[in-house]
Amino acid sequence: MYNELTLIPQRVREYPTLRGVDIPEANIVSVEPLPIATAEEAPTPFIEANTAAVSWKELTEESILPSYADGETVVPHAQFIQAIVLAAHDALPNDTFGPIELRASHLTQGRVPSAVYKKTSELLESEKTKYWERICFCVTVTSKQSNILGEQCALTFGGCRSLQDINYHGRKSSELFQTYISYRAKICSNLLISIRDGLKDRIEASGPAEIYAAAYQLFSQFNAEENAKSLEGLGRTRITVDQFTHLIGKLRYYNCLSTADKKELPFQIELGDSQVNAATRNFVNSHFGINGRDSLDLFNTLNCFNQAVKTNSYLHNFLSKNANCTTLMQGIQQSLEGTCSDYDWLLS
């Protein structure tokens, strides 16, 4: 059987949260831990809806670590983050990185047994317990900047994981993780993820070595220049207001179809009504919107949808919805240009 771990470069590390990862000995490198971005460094979050900024100390020192029935722990959030950051250091050895932008949601709060009868107002900080069920982070590759159709964009990478589907009553098993690499529009922090080459949305791993291997494979195979050209290509096709309103109506109609009817269509849409409604408002009113013109290019239209996903999505499906927006715009482009009919249903 092919082993993905063979993709790991031959390096030795001494990294506290990754001890136990078996990487063959070779060159010794030093990778300094990246700082966590402050509010001043990340004034516009890459995801907003239902999330909060968290510190590294809160994540590693002030949160409990859930365990399975056999006593084994879940993969800590810190191990997940550091495995992906190390993979980026190895896959992009000549690049420089900004601080980690860390967002979390679904805080589970508790208390120590000795405080079981205390009123909430009487609880000491030392008597409270908590952990974040969902976590997502983003790191900017500061050495890779690109101007895409007049918008300043930077290459970014990161990951997402959720503990919502874990069965804590059973034995330890593989857990699900996501990692991505994509450009990000500077003015609004919208991610521009391509599902074709920028997203691994289902990594089954029981430890950091497997997460590292999957992330390294994705990052090392990603072609930033080709990805930027693909996004720029959306600028050559424009959509009129009438075509856009028809598209919005069909997206709303799609969400009312039965599962069987959806399977008969040659595409899949992951956007719910809340994202579709928000995309419409962005099309009319946002920086990327129509702004009095009679048509809009598909790159700006993509950002209208990405902005909607950023502000109206749960953290655990944020990355896949963002990538689905890119796939949708590429399909609409093919339909408008007559090169592929798969998405004609949305405009007919």
Image: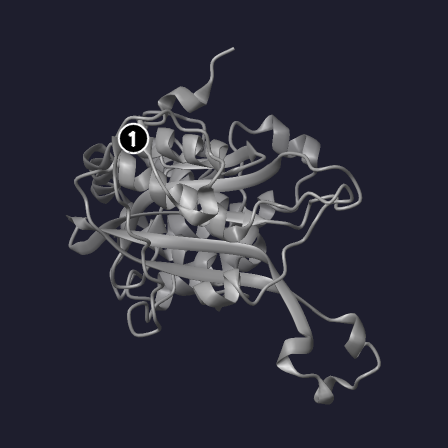
Q: Quadrant of residue 340?
A: top left
The residue carrying mark 1 is: 220
Q: Position of residue 55 (x, y in %)?
A: 45, 67
Q: Residue furthest right?
A: 117
Left or right: 230 as drawn, with respect to 342: left
Is 287 rendered above or below residue 176?
below
Left or right: 142 as drawn, with respect to 84: left
Is 58 rendered above or below residue 155?
below
Q: Residues within 10 Å of mark 1 (few under 14, many from 20)?
A: some
- Name the one closer to the observer, 155 or 302: 155
At x 25% / y 63%, what residue is drawn? 187
Count the marks: 1
Left or right: 89 as drawn, with respect to 251: left
SS for callout 1: helix
Q: Position of residue 288 (x, y in %)?
A: 29, 60
Q: Is residue 15 visible?
A: yes
- Name the one closer to the observer, 339 or 100: 100
Q: Position of residue 28 (x, y in %)?
A: 26, 35
- Name the one closer to the observer, 199 or 109: 109
Q: Position of residue 97 (x, y in %)?
A: 24, 52
The amino acid type, in three-letter code, at marker 1 is Ser
